[in-house]
Amino acid sequence: MVARTKIGLQEAGSSGGVDYRLAREAILAAWREGSLSREQICDSQRELQRNAEFCGTPVGRSCPVCESQTLVEVTYVFGPRLPKSGRCVTSDREMDRLAARKSVSQGYVVEVCTDCRWNHLTESRAIGGA
């Protein structure tokens, strides 16, 4: 894994954004009370798991489901002149290049546990438009 801070959407010259912590807590509360099964909340796709394993940034806290220390964040960017499936951003330098573009892209940060497959969108934000 690359040693760096979260490929910071906030640091990337972006403005405004959405924080999904309340939705995350609601899902975890529903799981704890039995309304959702572990299989329903630990369902990350193979590509997300691969990106988490090889490109994820450790968050320094344990997984809210299995309490493993393998919780990472993966940043994706979607926009003009990027692949249809988006780009998994792997460095601050790459994020800086995307933020410096004149076209606006959308960035998403996903929290992923590489052990139990927990995943949740934590943040989204517009990037670029300089």
Image (cartoon, rainbow, N blue to C red):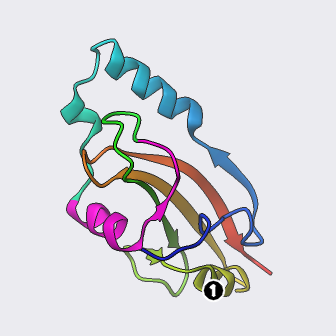
Q: Quadrant of the C terminus?
A: bottom right
Q: In which image quadrant can residue 21 be found? A: top right
User: Image height check: is 45 above or below 120?
Assistant: below
| Viewer-side residue, 108 vs 52 | 52
Q: Amino acid at mark 1?
A: Arg
Residue 66 horizontal side relative to residue 15, left or right? left
Residue 51 located within the stretch drawn in magenta: yes
In the image, the segment drawn in magenta is: 46-62
- The picture places residue 111, in percent across and down from the top left corner, at 45, 51
User: Image height check: is 74 above or below 16?
Assistant: below
- The picture places residue 54, in percent across and down from the top left corner, at 34, 73
User: Image height check: is 94 above or below 71?
Assistant: below
| Viewer-side residue, 68 vs 30 | 68
- The picture places residue 58, in percent across and down from the top left corner, at 48, 59
**Residue at the (27%, 51%) spot, across then down:** 44
Kindly state the secondary structure of the residue where label 1 is placed. helix
| Viewer-side residue, 49 vs 123 | 49
Q: In which image quadrant can residue 35 be found? A: top left
Residue 121 located within the stretch drawn in magenta: no
**Residue at the (45%, 77%) spot, across then down:** 87
Residue 86 horizontal side relative to residue 109, left or right? left
**Residue at the (37%, 73%) spot, across then down:** 85
Which residue corresponds to mark 1? 93
